[in-house]
Amino acid sequence: MKFIKFIFYLLGVLTVWCFASCKNSNNRGKVVTKTCDKMDNGFTRKDDAIWFYEIVLQNVDPNTFNVLDDYFFKDKNHVYFYESYRTSEDYFTSKRKRHLQLEKEDPASFISLGFGYAKDKNTAKYFSETDVAIFKILNEKYTLDKNGVYYHRKKVKNAVPLSFKVLSNFMGDADA
């Protein structure tokens, strides 16, 4: 009797797995396998659509879709910021996801600089814009532009960009 229960349990699990996999049945009852390509950072390409976890991304060209890093992706028409995040009220029980289309960026010249920074032919970005010609990432903590030096995106008081040097990951010499 236990063996029969086990067989029914196994058949149930296999049935659920078949329905949840990348298969689709057409009107004639034939099973057609979809193109299902898992990519980095929660993205999946299924036929002519790109998914970000369980969200189908609208107006994204799947043929030119490219994940740049842990923060940005693009296609031939647009650049996007994405993230997974948690909120304090349900921090341990759920993970939220979002993606935002960036309006001003040029997809053809947009590249990742690492650590959540990126640039195109006009601007450098991390939720604020600066002159791309003089924006520089010193390491994962320090950046600089013509207006100042930044530690974790917060301006360092009295630091002069032209003379600033990083001494270690935790200290910079504003008088160098």
Image (cartoon, grey):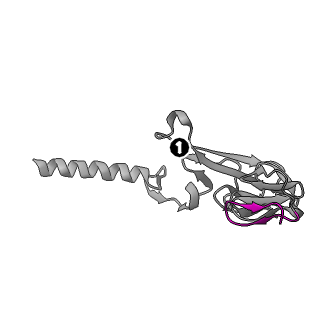
Nearest the viewer among 96 and 101 is 96
Q: Quadrant of residue 76?
A: bottom right
The magenta stretch spans which residues? 162-176
Asked if residue 89 is positioned above or below residue 141 in the image, the reply reads: above
Nearest the viewer among 134 and 163 is 163
Residue at the far top in the pictured view: 89
Which element is circle 1 on?
A: loop
Disc count in the image?
A: 1
Q: Is residue 56 visible?
A: no
Query: What's the residue at 57%, 61% (across, down)?
Result: 40
Q: Quadrant of residue 87?
A: top right
Q: Quadrant of the C terminus?
A: bottom right
Residue at the far front in the pictured view: 175
Q: Quadrant of residue 21?
A: bottom left
Query: What's the residue at 32%, 53% (across, down)?
Result: 14
Q: Amino acid under label 1?
A: Lys
Nearest the viewer among 105 and 94 is 94
Horizontal side of 71 relative to 154 (left or right) equals left
| Most common SS among magenta residues | loop
What percent of the width, then of the height, locates residue 8? 22, 48
What percent of the width, then of the height, locates residue 64? 71, 62
Q: Which residue is mark 1?
A: 95
Asked if residue 152 is positioned above or below residue 162 in the image, the reply reads: above
What percent of the width, then of the height, locates residue 78? 77, 54
What percent of the width, then of the height, locates residue 105? 82, 54
Query: What's the residue at 73%, 63% (across, down)?
Result: 112
The verdict on residue 110 being magenta is no
The verdict on residue 170 being magenta is yes
Q: Is residue 152 visible?
A: yes
> How many other residues sit within 10 Å of disc 1, few (<14), some (14-19) or many (≥20)?
few
